[in-house]
Image: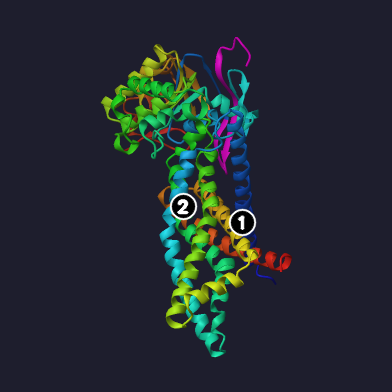
Amino acid sequence: MSKGITNLVEMRGIKLKFDDLVVLNGLNLSVQAQESLVIMGVSGCGKSTLLSILLGLLTPDAGSVKFKGEELTRLSRQEFNKIRMHIGMVYQNAALLSSLTIGENIGLPLQELSHQSSDEISAVIDEKLALVGLSEAREKFPSELSGGMQKRAGMARALAMEPELILFDEPTAGLDPINSDLINELMITLREKQKVTSIIVTHEMESAFALATRMAFMDQGKMILVGTPDEFRNSDLPLIREFLSPHSGNKKRTTKGSIHEIA
Amino acid sequence: MPDTSVIAQLGALILTWLKELSGVVWMLCDTGAEIMESLGRRKAPLRLDEFFFQCTRAGIGSIPMVVLLSLFIGLTMALLTGYQLEIFGIVTLVPAVVSVSFTREMGPLFTGIVLAARIGAAYTAELGAMTAGGEVDAIDGMGIGSLRYLVTPRILAIFCLTPCLSIIAVLSGIAGAAFISNLLLHLGYGFFGDQVMKNLFAKDMLSGLVKSFFFGAIIGIIACYKGLSMKGGAVGVGTATTQSVVASICTVIACDSLCNIAMITFFP
């Protein structure tokens, strides 16, 4: 990988269709090292799909995806797997392996991909569990934990390989305010203390403004605005004004993109 | 005028079948690639603990059902064959008929059907649920390789264990036949055993054993493929499981016929 690259992630002209449905239509996005980019947009606009492309779970129909200057769309499976070791993902539903304990889930990537000894892996598991406040849950199975605890365990697993980039897919969706705050605090700690770059997909405005160093808004397969939280607050774009409005829950969006009041 | 809708349906069916076949081939190629990649990282090609767990489940767990089924089939077969042969005064042929047919055909085939229903269904349901729950994507997203991690131990376990279960099925079937022959056809255990040893050739045993390996591989591959390629939630898991069992049983029976034709043609 070449040196002196400021953009950790660079996506240019990404296009993706599922049958006749255009999900991404020439999307451009760059993420700088150590920033927290929050991606917003209405449900089904392709935010999670974007994360799947970055992780190599989906291949775009056209466009370029670069991670640390390396073109991902041209990599072989083996080469992509090496890149994946530098990217962690926290899934919306945590996606912990239900047949493994929380400790085994966190140790899984280390056991399968690294050459660390069992003692070293065990120490990493303890460290990551302590970081997310789940030290007592090491021997429990995912089904024995609450949704918030599962998400924290998912976060611990994503951190196990010390990734440079973490992708968060709706990290606080469906959680109560206390658990949401816990997750938000963890993400802020990661950004400020561990200097981890993160891309966060969320609908929670409070979380978004608390976490973001930069924000992006997706609509109809493209980024319609990328900027600082202040630029978002002051944006004149009607869709963004409506989305950020505290009353946005009382609005209905038509298929053409405009928003109308619900009677 | 030909019925275009029937032709169209047939075409669609063939296309679906070819799609599934290419999916299976790609799955096997990708599994091989993931194993090589793991070896390249100087890591084990499969998880031994999971392999032994699957062996216990597919092998030891299936013994009672295989034994019971084979015992009753052997018993029924000897009884019905015996009553027919008695008319011609050749009831003494029962041990030869039962042992050869059980070794070459019945044992491996019934083992295959039992495993398709019991283990194949379980594999598909498990992998289907993991796919639906995002666990498979999570494994791939970490760069671990879901095929090496999930598929390899399962296919290898059923591939290795099917011949073992097949041997157990043959022994149980012959035992059932010997029991009923002694009870109702008045053939002594000693005579029955002698006849079995005299009429059973290495070729018969080898034929059954080779088929069993094929059956094990077929069931494992179809079950894993159906599980990983399922679409939808709980309903999708159910549909995939049904399709897996039906496809496995049909393919096992078709493979059995092809093996028989090949054996008879090339090793008469």
Mark 2: which secondary structure? helix
The colour mode here is rainbow
Residue lying farthest to the front in this orientation: B190
| Residue A115 in picture, x, y percent from top left | 51, 24
Quadrant holding the N terminus of chain B: bottom right
Q: Main secondary structure of the magenta part?
A: strand
| Residue A195 in picture, x, y percent from top left | 44, 13
The vertical placement of B141 against B248, above or below, is above
| Residue A99 in picture, x, y percent from top left | 39, 40
- The residue that disc 2 covers is B58
Magenta-span inclusion, residue A58: no
Q: In the image shown, does A247 or A162 lie closer to the viewer?
A: A162
- The residue that disc 1 covers is B17
Disc 2 residue type? Ala
Say which quarter of the image contains residue A14: top right
| Residue B176 in picture, x, y percent from top left | 45, 71
Whether residue B39 is visible: yes
Magenta-span inclusion, residue A10: yes
Residue B163 as seen in the image, left or right of residue A228? right
Numbered circle sitting on residue A106: none
Q: How many marks?
A: 2
Mark 1: which secondary structure? helix
Disc 1 residue type? Trp
**Residues in magenta?**
A1-25
